[in-house]
Image (cartoon, rainbow, N blue to C red):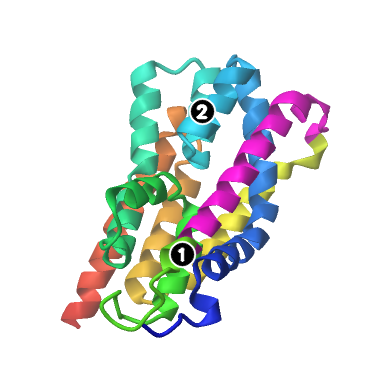
Amino acid sequence: MQPLPAHWTRRAEFLAGCRAELPIILGVAPFGMIYGALAVGAGLSAFAAQAMSSVVFAGSAQFIAAQLIREGSPGLVVAVTVLVVNLRHLLYSASVAPYLRHLRAGWKGLLAYLLTDEAYAVAIGRYLRDGDRTDADPVSPNRHWYFLGAGLVLWGSWQVSTGVGIFLGALVPASWSLDFTLPLTFIALVFPSLRDRGAFAAALGGGGIAVLAFGLPYKLGLMLAAVGGIAVGLVADRAEREA
């Protein structure tokens, strides 16, 4: 058996994934602090707020859930909103599945738990750079360690920033407005993936609907924007194929 190239070893792949995720942490960490402070302000105990980050580990869903709890929204509304917000993970899973199908169930479960917007963006970027090949072709047999490295860096930073927000969030002046960092992070993640007419249409349609529906109660504008963006993208994609 030929030895693996140095950059294909488990350690090298893991560290490469960690390094790729680090720049994204700059935008995620302030968001984690805001979530921690918001969750405590919404009435959650410090343990419950931290446990939500450890168990749920879905930043945008946690943020929205805390806001809805603070506003006294019914439990059903909170559950449905979180479900809709997280539906995109089904698309992420379908996208990375061809590259992970050879792994054991334990590995798939671990990577599924670590699958977030930020970890997905880094991992799928690596897999797409490899080309359309799957593991049946000559690619690194350890590239799932790249995914693991990216996911664990994101997970660790999220736990730490949540804890900082829980215990020190009240000390951060509201005038700092750190919440602007998350939209910038998502824009940076989404923009490179806009490679065809359907993707551009979905982004513009969803963004436009989100702005117009911003004032709707219970964050219904978010759900409306998600569904509307998908619909606009599908229509544009079909029109492009039939042109």
Q: Is residue 105 above or below residue 237?
A: above
Q: Given the current orientation, which residue lies at the most extreme front position?
A: 1
Judge from the rendering whether residue 118 lies leftward or rightward of residue 75; answer left or right. Answer: right
Amino acid type of disc 1? Ala
**Would you say the magenta stretch is mainly helix, strand or loop?**
helix
In the image, is residue 231 part of the stretch drawn in magenta? Answer: no
* Crowding near the residue tagged with mark 1, few <14, some 14–19, many ≥20 C-alpha atoms within 10 Å: many
The location of residue 223, given as percent across then percent down, is 37, 40
Q: Is residue 130 above or below residue 20?
A: below
- Badge number at residue 123: 1
From mark 1 to mark 2, how far is it between C-alphas?
24 Å
**Residue linked to disc 2:** 52
Quarter placement of the N terminus = bottom left
- Badge number at residue 46: none
Residue 97: name its quadrant: bottom left
Quarter placement of the C terminus = bottom left
Marks counted in the figure total 2
The location of residue 154, given as percent across then percent down, is 58, 50
Residue 132 or residue 225, whichever sits in front: 132
Residue numbers of the magenta segment:
146-174
Q: Name the residue: 34% across, 83% down.
A: 138
Q: Name the residue: 31% across, 80% down.
A: 132
Say whether marks 1 and 2 touch (CB < 8 Å): no
Amino acid type of disc 2? Met
